[in-house]
Structure formats: C-alpha cells, structure tokens
Amino acid sequence: MQQITEQQIQAMAPNAAAAANGKKISQKGGFVRLSRSGDDTFYLGECTGSGKSNYITSVDFLDPNSPVCRCTCPSRQFPCKHGLALLYEIAAGKEFSLCEIPEDILKKREKKQARAAKEQDSGEEDRELTPQELQKKEKARAAAAKSSRAARRKKLEKQLEGLGLAEKLVQELVRGGLGAMGGASVKTYEQLGRQLGDYYLPGPQRLLNGLILEISAFQKDSDEIHYDSALDILEKLWALIKKSQSYLTEKLEKEEDGPDSSPLYEELGGIWKLSELEAAGRMRSAQLAQLAFWVTYDPARKEYIDIGCWGDLSDGQIYLTCNYRPLKALKYVKEEDSVFGVAQVPQAAFYPGEGNLRVRWESASLREVTPQDLAQLRKAAPGSLAQEARVAKNLLKNALADPFYIRLVPFHRIGTADLGLTLENPAGETILLGCAPGMENTLERLESLPRAELLQDQVMVGAYFYDMTDRRLKLQPLSILTASHVVRLLY
C-alpha cells in the first residue's frame, strides 16, 4: 500500500473546505468499491454522490512524489473532494481489491512520458549524447513500446472475455424465450451491464442498458411492443458480439490495436481522433449544404444527440454530423443548432462505415445556398426508385446499421393512395411515405405546405426505413429541394 499522511493530503487540497469534505466522505463510507493495481501505482474508487450515477475516482502514483487525482464528477476543483476522499481511504489503510490499470490511464501515462522525453530531447539538442546515453535512451524507448504493446494486448483479451459473458446472456435469453421477460431479474442484467464497462465494452454495454429499459417497461405496462424492441436490441447485440469476436481475435493474432477501417472500432466504444482519421486517408475538403436538422434522446446512452443532415455539392451524397450531449454534462456541452447555408470545409473527416457516413470538422466558413448549389444537388438525385430501395433494404438488413438511409429522391408528384400518402417518381415508380420510430411527424407538415407546386416535380430529402408494423419499406420526408429553396420539414 502507498503511504500518505493527512498532512500531505491537506497540502494537495485546493482549499481547507475541500479537504474537510473529502475526509467526511471517507469517514461516512462513501465508497462502494475500492481497487488498486498489482504494482501499487494505481488506486480506484467508486463513490456515491449527488448525481444519478456513482463517480469513478482514481489516483495515479506513477510518480509517488506527485500523485495525480482524476474523477468523473463535474467539479472544477483539482483534486476534487472525491479524489481527496480516496487519498484518505489510502491513508486509513482500507482494504483494496486488485484490478488492472485502465487503458485510458496507460495512454495518459504514455503521453506524459512522451512529453517528458521530448522536453529532455530538446534540452539535449545543444550537446552530443555519449554512446552510453544513446544506448540508455534507446532502451527506454524499447521498454515503453513493449509496455504499450503488452497493455494493448491485455485490453483486447479483456474485451474478448467480456464479449464471452455477453454471448452467454444472449444465449440464455434466446433459450428461455422473450416470453420470460416479465419474470426476468433486472438486477442481474444491470450487474452484467456494469461488468461490461470493466471489460472496455461501452458499446455492448449501451445495448444491454437498452434491453434493461425494455424489460423494465414491459414489467410496468405489459405492452407487447416492448417484445419487438427487445428483439431488435438482441439481434443487434448478437451481431455485434459475433463480428467483434472475429475482429478482436484477428487484431490479437496480428498484434494490432487502435482504430482501423472497421466500423466495429466505434461500435465497441472506441473514439476516433481527427489525427487517426487523417492517417487513414479519410480527410478531404468539402462543400456541404445542411438539408435537415433534428435532436433525439437515447435513454440507454442517457444523452441527447444533435443530428445535422448534409448534402455534398460534389456528388449529392448525404452525410451526418452528430453532437453528443450526455445528461451529466449538459452544462458543459453546447447544443448545436440548424445551419441554413453551405459549410465550406477545408478539412472534413469522414468516418468509416456504410450508409450515411458521419462527418466532422474543426473549422469551416459559411455562405448562403445559391440556386446553382440546389441545381447540383437536384441533378445528383438518382433516377431509379426501385434500385435505391434495393440498396436501402440491403443496408437496413445489417443489424449494426443505422435504422434509416437518407437519399435524394426525385418525384413527379406526392398524393394520397389506398394505403396512404405516396410518392411517385418521374418513371412512375411509387413508395409509401411514413414516419420512422423516434422521429418527428413530418407527414403532417408535408400535407400542410401552402403551395401545391411543392408536391410536384421536385426533389425530396428522404429517409428510407423499415416499418415493423406494416412490414414494408417506407420513406420519411425530411426536406424538399426546389430550384430556389430548401423547404425543411425537420429544422
């Protein structure tokens, strides 16, 4: 165990009140879990707080003379009272179970060591290193690289182990049948959900949280609609488990880690950096016109998502921007809004995947949409509705795909048929219009448009989706592109 005194803790505290509050948390038993690494350089605690979720607090003793406290709470004090409380737990000699050092901590250590090495290198530029110094420096680099490879391999193995647990859960649910949902133990699933976080699997963890929400909802109202939702989540979870097991096993065999061209990296919970996307050759300049905008709430992720729908003026492809705003960080993450114009982006990063790829950029200049821009987009709209529908069906069959596929759709007219509101393209092909689950009702807005010519010989920005109730492919209208305007149904 690390040795630390109350005087040292008080010296680290930003003020006396923080130290006193930290001591109170420790004395009142505020921690529900205490762990430390086998090499005694890392300590972790799960602490109850005022938020809905417990706070994860850690202390890194890589440099014993300068321990680093981290915490998931929103406090701007450093260390916060939870970090100080964890130090008090250490000082009191509390019992800590053994744990692995998290991957993000190892990466932070690597960055810190890299900065220190860079500073040392810059200080040594003025003199020539001796052969002994060069040898020592090379050994240090080799040791750091070896440590990094070992940590990456350990993370991959841990992820595979967690996927094995999730696989057993899905198999048990399938064997027992979804009819057993009403008697299922939510606490059992919640416990596994927390475990998946320990296995570096936030992606599968979010899916399991969604399943828990459906089971809980069914136990309250017995509405059978929760069966369909649960089945959809199970299908996606199973697909993610099986594909990810092959993906991670291959990375282990090739001794590879980090992001690659596979969308599974992000599905498992990985976060792409712009530098990584650039290294993968996924950055280019672009002119993108925003054609729709909406906000959704994901209860499993406990976050709002601001979604922008953008048309590429070069080829008419549709891309999405996503701004994630977790509930616990709403005061720190700015909400995005509609953009009525064209973003001229010098360097846009396009994420791997299928369907409507996500795009992201750091800076762009805005200008107004011109009739020439609209003419380019309208011209890029594909002519065959049947062919587009086949592509959409194949994409939507993928359990890991987005639940919709947005395209430009030219139409001759929109009117009411036997089955409802229908779009007919210039070739006479038709498709039924509808509203995808979780989306706003744009059909009402479409029918209330003031000018009849907006429903004739225009181009629609539409989202293909599969209607589970009617068992058929439908198209949700998002906007209409005329020769002079973008008429938005989602703002």
Image: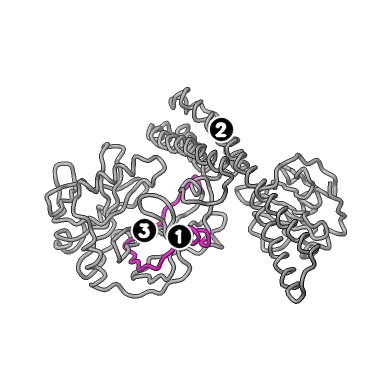
Front residue of 140 and 467: 140
Q: Which residue is mark 3?
A: 319
The secondary element bearing badge 2 is classed as helix
Sequence-first disc among 1 and 3: 1
Mark 1 and mark 3 residues within 8 Å of each other at the beta carbon: no
Residue 160 shown in magenta: no
Observer-side mark, 1 or 2, equals 1
The amino acid type found where label 2 is placed reads: Gly
Q: Give the distance between the C-alpha atoms of the residues marked 1 and 2, in whole angstroms.
A: 33 Å
Q: Which residue is mark 2?
A: 164
The secondary element bearing badge 1 is classed as loop
Front residue of 114 and 481: 114
Q: Residue at x 75, y 76 (%)?
A: 126
Q: Residue at x 75, y 61 (%)?
A: 137
Where residue 19 appears, as percent x and y from the top left, is 79, 59
The amino acid type found where label 3 is placed reads: Tyr
Q: Which residue is mark 1?
A: 281
The secondary element bearing badge 3 is classed as strand
Where residue 456 appears, as percent x and y from the top left, is 14, 59
Where residue 434 appears, as percent x and y from the top left, is 26, 47
- Range of residues picked out in magenta: 274-301
The image quadrant where one finds the C terminus is bottom left
